[in-house]
Amino acid sequence: MNAINSGTRQLDPVAADPAPDTAASPDQPFRFTGPRQLFARAPGPTVQGLLALVIYLVVFVLAAGMPLARHLNVPNLRQYWTDVQFYAWALGWWPWAVSHGVNPLFSSQIGAPHGYDLAWASTAPSVDLLMWPVTAAFGAVVSYNVVLLLIPPVSGWACFVLARRLTGRFWAALLAGAVYGFCPYELQHTWQGQPNLTVIALFPLMGYLVLRWWEGSLRATWLVVWLALAMAVQFYTFNEAFAEMAAVLAGGLVIGLAVAGRSGWRKVARLAGLAALALAGSIALAAPYLLYSLRHYQGALTRQEPAYSLPLVRLIVPNSLQSFGVTPVIRYSGHLGRTGIEDYVGIPLIVVLLLLAGFAWRSRVSRLLLLGFAFVIALAVGPNLVVTSVRHTYRLPWAPLWNLPFARSAEPSRFIVFAVLVLAIALALWLAAPVTGRPARPVPLRRLLAGGRWALGLLAAAAIISDAPTSYEAVNPIPLGYQPPAAMHPANQLPAFITQGMYRRYLRPGESVAVLTYRGNAGMLFQAASGFYFRIAGGYINASLTPVNALPHPVTLLAHPSGTALRMFDDYARSAGLGALVVEQAWAEPWMNLGKLGMRGTTAGGVTVYPMAPWLARQARPAAAPHRHARSKTHPTARR
């Protein structure tokens, strides 16, 4: 196992054994360990990278993404949720705002009449602007589905690039990329429709840049420039992940100093200085967004509760639905609930890391990975140590650090993505040890050791990938326990009222509309699909700033139309300039039949449009002195 060091000789000047002559250099093509009759010599790193990306994309689409790939123009994902519609809306919002010269961090198109501040909403502008051509050509729904299909393969490819550079081995890097790109964390949040959390490709690419500089193939100036750009893009993707990245980077540099020894201190210290310059440059690039956000801070949820911490047991206990048929594991996992199911990495992958560190302890890279993994897990635990259940927690000594402004609203368990990256790189190094071993060992023994190493590596990859959620639950439009109203059949397709442009016949440009439907946050989805033709009363951007049901509270009062409720709705409709209520028939609930309230609607294209002007005119109160209103005992809809 000392041969493991051969793939890291440029990083580790004091590796235990010199690299065998047959080891592949990160800059040189290598020989496949597969059938030699098929490949005499592998292509170069660029072609290998493209090949890896194609493999990841094809496998992901065929294995998990077919429901989306077959219906790119249909909003398939969890339509009863609010998040998915918000991110689809954001894909349309940023291009629309930029092309119309309006502030993209404030939208008057939602939350009518006053609008919503988006400074602390995770709109992922880097993704939105990158997908602008797709959104402009095919619409926000298609663009959103394409994002969902591309992000996991691209994440896997980014990890492949780093692992390939580190080890020089195609198959080892390919497996490492699959572990990172298709881990439970990535796919869980992909099927929850949250690109701000799933765009994790930049982290291994930053590691690739550092590795190139350490090898001497990238100048310090370009390291700073490229790192600053990558960090800035990460900020514009998700500022919480940017802060987490900074914390992991700082901790990694400290660990690097600890394991480098005197011979490496100066180089690590120089790397720390270059990283600090890059971080400063990224903050300068992010300054417009950052300063605006700080000036418009509206408060955020505090996520210091144990529910947001990493349950340590979830590192090794998979989801009960994917517990490999082991009944005791299924029962125990079901007892734990769904908390932390995205944090699973599996016992075999952890064993690979421990064996790598044990057999190659003299390798500084092995020690860096082991200590880095422990550091990241300590961050993921957060202020509360949760071993099995949130009912039994322990407050940790560093808990006050989570009271800092940028840490207060962060979810500690999201640090797991860095732990998965560490484990993926460890797996690549474990598999990259050459097939040939010490000359004194018999050939059958060397082959047996190599086979055992690959068997464990394949088991580790299979254990984590097989626990990743599938798209079945994600595209199921009806949540567990929900019974749709009689004669209602919830469908994911957008109503023809939107897709065929029928809204232009029934709504005025810029008119304020409230959309009533059980489909989560449908108003923002309809608005994005219509090219922001109308404004939305309400809308959901995050749980701390807007109602989860995406409707203004006075509108929800129509579900229980008492006299007080109707008066509050009347006042709101007049003050907000509400022009119409639009009810999506396929997702409607019984109370959304507003004809019972005396409203007159027109059904067209799968929706019923209730213009507010005629109804409000009938409810108009006669002009009178305030004291006469106070004496009235009748409902405002009654004649005086």
Image (cartoon, rainbow, N blue to C red):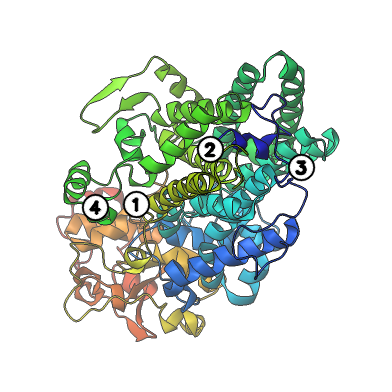
Q: Does label 3 or label 2 sit earlier along the sequence?
A: 3
| Front disc: 1 or 2 | 2
Q: Which residue is drawn at 32% across and 73% down?
A: 615
Q: How crowded is mark 2: few (under 14 residues within 10 Å), some or many (20 or more)?
A: many
Residue type for callout 2? Val
| Front disc: 1 or 3 | 3
Q: Does label 1 or label 4 sit earlier along the sequence?
A: 1
Look at the picture and state if 29 lies above or below 302: below
Q: Does label 1 or label 2 sit earlier along the sequence?
A: 2
| Residue 628 marker | 4
Q: How crowded is mark 4: few (under 14 residues within 10 Å), some or many (20 or more)?
A: few
- Name the residue that disc number 1 marks: 548
> Could you tell me if the residues under marks 1 and 3 are in contact, i.e. CB atoms within 8 Å?
no
Q: How crowded is mark 3: few (under 14 residues within 10 Å), some or many (20 or more)?
A: some
Could you tell me how far apart the alpha carbons at marks 4 and 3 are, in whole angstroms?
71 Å
Label 1 residue SS: loop
Could you tell me how far apart the alpha carbons at marks 1 and 2 are, in whole angstroms?
36 Å
Residue type for callout 1? Val
Label 3 residue SS: helix
| Front disc: 4 or 3 | 3
Q: Residue at x 68, y 67 (%)?
A: 39
- Name the residue that disc number 3 marks: 226
Could you tell me how far apart the alpha carbons at marks 1 and 4 are, in whole angstroms?
39 Å
| Front disc: 3 or 2 | 2
> Could you tell me if the residues under marks 3 and 2 are in contact, i.e. CB atoms within 8 Å?
no
Could you tell me how far apart the alpha carbons at marks 1 and 3 are, in whole angstroms?
39 Å
Could you tell me how far apart the alpha carbons at marks 2 and 4 are, in whole angstroms?
73 Å
